[in-house]
């Protein structure tokens, strides 16, 4: 070998007759790169270098994985759009039997899309007593649609039509109980060692009576036990004994429930609202020493829905209004499921005040933490369990409350009929369909009945409000259907319906309502004002509403430090104010009036 080995020298060094192997005196030294010692040294160095490089890559990947995710835009549909809740038996009847159905909803899909909503939310469809239609036919089947509501083919057709309109479909899923005629229950009660023996909550008698209950739950008084002579144990039920509660501690039951999610996902359902789960979960709660199931059950379902990979962006809603901190969700874009926290924006009873609404909003936004990617407040003014807005507070507040809800951070949902300001139905005991209300008898039924808020949709002022072409409706119509209906409001630019479309249209086009920050500006008994803003915008948007009983004059500049003196009206409950310019130090609002202003930053 020559005294000068150019292995390892650069091209420039080779051209200049130089080498890397030069001692401090400038003398070239002979180095044989093929001696055993140097070969071993080179291998060790190369392996160390390779391992170091791999380690850096792993660290980089881990760092990227822990960074906040920016999910694909389509996956944010459930956080930025308006939902519309339809109680299926009460929306539109297509076959004249007086009960709303899936084909009826299909016939009104243009109307729903015209409300600028992007998610159609349906009440449960399966053949079960929860529909309240056939309280004596309690043969629950989670995969069979109640024949009075339609067929599986009807559901498939509706899903296709919804997707064609670039909308999504969410389905109420109520897996908390079945009827006592259900095949699951029949097998469970047959013995204590069959495959479904633990699918329900069974307990031995305690001191000759019902099981001992030690639950830290506000709903304990509604938990009851029924003795079954076949199994010689008690089963638990929540409201009526014909509806035994499922036992979510059973792994095989949870697996079965997950298979039901897969069934509906394959049909094309985009989302599920897990209804009636709130009281099932809690810490330190026992029945004869057995701990109640935790939120891990919802987490399992969350993963099941999230793992559906048929090019869909699906999600799960968990209604748990009493314990937002107990919810954990996936932070990864890989998972498409999440929980929204359904909560009423308005009080059940008592006066309507700006302070009251503001406190609800602040509490939930702070608790939920808007900085968490997959946790969102989910606002509703009313649902099937609560009297309608016009009935509870007065029709003059319908528009202002819709304006507030539609401009808050989070996900707004409208219960059918609230966009036109429907009133409750008046339902006698003889007309009652709610199974629980029937058990309370003719004196007390009204205290628990949900029938009054489930009246048929008021489409026009003709006989049966154009809900059905039959002779009767399954529940009485709203008391004011002849004057408050879709047809009478469609061409009226100052109607509830027109104002609803106006504010939902604004929400769909103004990014601040979807992703902007929230700040309370003023809250009094009469007035609630808040602002949506972002550092990326040169303006903010402010909603100001008067929920009091008298006209109010508000000096916004007193509460909001800005050099701006005016704001331009983006939306108003009084249509004559649209596009007007308003002085910020003297905003006059009548009772039930609201405006949404664009205010340039100072």
Image: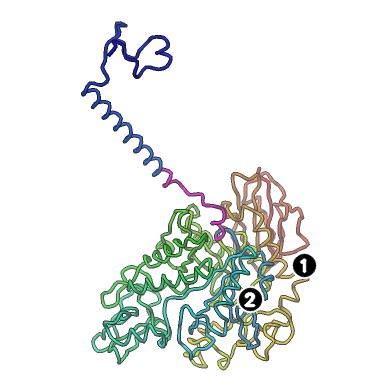
Q: In which quarter of the image is residue 241?
A: bottom left
Instruction: Check disc 2: other Cα within 10 Å, few if <14, some if 14-19, many if 20+.
Output: many
For the C terminus, the quadrant is top right
Q: Can residue 447 be seen in this view?
A: yes
What's the mark number on residue 333?
Answer: none
What's the mark number on residue 493?
Answer: 1
> In this picture, which residue range is highlighted in magenta?
63-78
200 in relation to 305, above or below: below
Q: In which quarter of the image is residue 400?
A: bottom right
Side (left or right) of 553 relative to 208:
right
Does the residue at mark 2 contact the one at mark 1 (Cβ under 8 Å)?
A: no
Q: What element carries label 2?
A: helix
Count of numbered badges drawn on the protein:
2
Instruction: Check disc 1: other Cα within 10 Å, few if <14, some if 14-19, many if 20+.
Output: some
List the residue tagged with mark 2: 105
Q: Is mark 1 on a helix, strand or loop?
A: loop
Where is residue 200 shown, x and y percent of the image? 34, 80
């Amino acid at each position: 070998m020559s005294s000068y080995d150019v292995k390892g020298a650069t091209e420039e060094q080779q051209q200049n007759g130089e080498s890397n192997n030069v001692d401090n005196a400038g003398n070239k030294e002979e180095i044989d790169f093929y001696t055993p010692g140097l070969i071993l040294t080179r291998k060790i160095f190369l392996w160390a270098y390779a391992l170091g490089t791999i380690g850096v890559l792993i660290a980089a990947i881990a760092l990227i994985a822990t960074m906040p995710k920016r999910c694909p835009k389509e996956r944010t549909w459930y956080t930025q759009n308006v939902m519309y809740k339809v109680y299926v038996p009460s929306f539109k009847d297509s076959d004249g039997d007086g009960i709303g159905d899936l084909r009826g909803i299909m016939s009104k899909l243009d109307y729903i899309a015209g409300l600028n909503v992007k998610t159609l939310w349906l009440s449960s469809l399966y053949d079960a007593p929860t529909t309240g239609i056939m309280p004596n036919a309690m043969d629950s089947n989670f995969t069979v649609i109640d024949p009075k509501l339609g067929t599986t083919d009807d559901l498939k057709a509706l899903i296709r039509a919804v997707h064609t309109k670039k909308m999504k479909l969410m389905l109420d899923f109520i897996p908390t109980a079945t009827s006592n005629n259900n095949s699951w229950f029949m097998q469970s009660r047959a013995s204590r060692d069959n495959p479904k023996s633990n699918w329900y909550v069974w307990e031995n008698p305690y001191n000759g009576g019902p099981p001992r209950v030690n639950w830290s739950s506000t709903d304990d008084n509604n938990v009851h036990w029924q003795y079954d002579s076949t199994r010689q144990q008690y089963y638990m039920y929540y409201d009526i004994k014909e509806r035994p509660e499922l036992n979510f501690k059973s792994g095989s039951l949870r697996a079965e429930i997950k298979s039901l999610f897969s069934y509906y996902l394959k049909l094309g359902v985009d989302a599920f609202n897990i209804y009636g789960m709130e009281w099932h979960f809690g810490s330190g709660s026992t029945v004869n020493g057995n701990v109640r199931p935790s939120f891990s059950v919802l987490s399992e379902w969350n993963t099941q829905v999230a793992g559906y990979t048929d090019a869909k962006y699906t999600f799960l809603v968990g209604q748990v209004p009493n314990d937002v901190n107990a919810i954990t969700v996936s932070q990864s874009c890989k998972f498409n499921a999440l929980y929204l926290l359904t909560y009423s924006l308005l009080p059940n009873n008592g006066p309507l005040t700006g302070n009251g609404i503001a406190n609800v909003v602040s509490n939930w936004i702070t608790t939920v933490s808007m900085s968490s990617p997959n946790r969102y407040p989910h606002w509703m003014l009313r649902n099937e369990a609560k009297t309608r807005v016009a009935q509870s507070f007065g029709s003059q507040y319908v528009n202002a409350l819709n304006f507030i809800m539609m401009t808050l951070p989070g996900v707004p949902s409208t219960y059918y009929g609230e966009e036109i300001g429907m009133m409750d139905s008046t339902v006698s005991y003889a007309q009652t369909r709610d199974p629980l209300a029937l058990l309370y008898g003719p004196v007390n039924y009204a205290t628990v009945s949900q029938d009054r808020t489930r009246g048929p949709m008021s489409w026009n002022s003709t006989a049966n409000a154009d809900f059905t072409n039959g002779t009767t409706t399954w529940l009485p119509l709203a008391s004011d259907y002849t004057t408050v209906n879709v047809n009478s409001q469609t061409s009226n630019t100052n109607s509830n319906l027109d104002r609803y479309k106006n504010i939902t249209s604004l929400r769909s086009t103004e990014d601040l309502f979807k992703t902007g920050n929230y700040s309370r500006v003023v809250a009094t008994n009469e007035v609630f004002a808040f602002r949506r803003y972002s550092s990326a915008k040169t303006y903010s948007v402010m909603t100001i509403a008067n929920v009091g009983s008298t006209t109010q004059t508000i000096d916004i500049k007193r509460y909001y430090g800005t050099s701006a003196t005016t704001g331009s009206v983006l939306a108003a409950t009084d249509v004559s104010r649209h596009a007007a310019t308003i002085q910020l130090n003297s905003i006059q609002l009548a009772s039930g009036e609201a405006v949404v202003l664009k205010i340039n930053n100072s």
